[in-house]
Amino acid sequence: MIELPDATLFGPANLPYGVFSVPGHPRRRIGVAIGDNVLDVAPLADASDCGAELARLLAAPVLNPLLAAGRPTWTELRARLTDWIHGPADVLRPHLLAVEEVELHLPVDVGDYVDFYASEHHATNVGRIFRPGSEPLTPNWKHLPIGYHGRSGTIVVSGTDIVRPQGQRRGDAGPEFGPSTRLDIEAEVGFVLGGATRMGESVAVADVAAHVFGVFLLNDWSARDIQAWESTPLGPFLGKSFATSVSPWVVPLDALDAARVAPPPRDPPLLPYLRDVDDRGLDLELEVALNGYVVSRPPFAGMYWTAAQQLAHLTVNGASVRPGDVLASGTVSGPEKEQRGSLLELSWGGTEPIPLPAGDTRTFLQDGDEITITATAPGTAGSRIGLGEVRGRVLPARP
């Protein structure tokens, strides 16, 4: 077995998938993160006895063919990877590339993208900010996972700069047009779907593992002033559709077995199609940094709605899913102030500036600001695994 850095978050318990290219050689191919390296899996598969079909899937320039292959293939491939990683180091070394020497790309050709609203703490905070003196949660919130369909064409990989969006916003004398002045982030977890369904079919909560391949981190950039003006009576549109950033590594669902936890108690009782059958929550610890300074540590374990319930609700009307579809959790926020997953909450609607080093503060993002979201989870044998990072820097609005 190859030597790995001490306390690496990308050890044999993780083995997340991504897509990379080498400078001067633009062909994209599938890689697996191991330590500080990327394992080029296609030539390794060709040189092994893993079979022509598995080798073909690994030679693709995107993960979608592998996603379409289904759970038995995902399980077989993970077992192969584990054997290779624990095998002779001299067999692996020719296929290892230092991560700083490769370019990481969007790992999935994203199909449909649905963003949910699964944190009770986030939904309560937002309700109190926008509807003070009223019940913070809408009457339906604890009965169904609320979500909206986003724009898959503006999902970008970590490291992509984000141009400040322009649009209409409410002014003192009527609507105004210009760059957003309340640019925000939302720290989220994305679930990448594999196994397809046909129109008219639905997915039961017990069958989530047949359809969810893995998870990555997600930043749902949000222009709060544009969103507030346009979201009556319908939901988010231009305030959300300009950009969504995701981490380059998709952590397989199988790598998160040790992170499974029971979700919070549900009250009132749920309708039968949304009732849990086992522990579907995940004990992920997120961290949000603004210009390198940590401003929040949101815990994912307390999310009210799980991915299994979100997928069950999404398909209960017969809507189909395809390989490469993404379900986003919605903003991850905890009960404490330092656990809030958006600047809207951290600054309480802009009324409480967020302290930064050297006496600096923020309410919402300024041009040049950089947001980095990371996360870890329990792995097997007492290890911890990482979900990579999702990073983006704000550029000024274009003329």
Image (tube, rainbow, N blue to C red):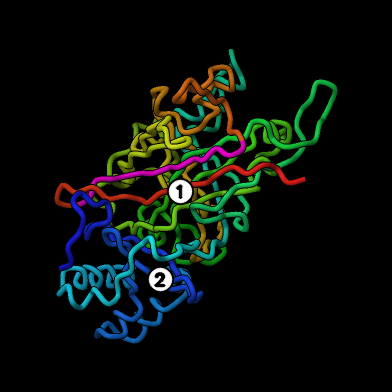
Kindly identify the amino acid type of the residue bearing the numbered disc 2: Ile
- Quarter of the image for the N terminus: give it: bottom left
| Pick the front one: 278 or 293 | 293
Dot 2, crowdedness within 10 Å: few (<14), some or many (≥20)?
many
| Pick the front one: 127 or 28 | 28
The reply to whether the magenta stretch includes residue 189 is no
Query: Which residue is located at x 27 percent, y 68 percent?
Result: 78
Query: Which residue is located at x 60 percent, y 45 percent?
Result: 148
Write down the residue under mark 2.
Answer: 30
Q: In terms of secondary structure, where does tag 1 sit?
A: strand
List the single residue furthest toward the top.
133
Write down the residue under mark 1.
Answer: 390
Main SS, magenta region, reads strand
Measured as percent of width and height from the top left, residue 397 is found at 70, 43
The reply to whether the magenta stretch includes residue 376 is yes
| Pick the front one: 383 or 210 | 383
- Quarter of the image for the C terminus: give it: top right
Q: Which mark is residue 306?
A: none
Position of 133 relative to 95 (above/below) = above
* CA distance separating discs 2 and 1: 19 Å
List the single residue furthest toward the front.
358
| Magenta stretch in the rendered image | 367-379
Q: Quadrant of residue 240?
A: top right
Measured as percent of width and height from the top left, residue 222 is found at 60, 39
Measured as percent of width and height from the top left, residue 208 is found at 38, 56
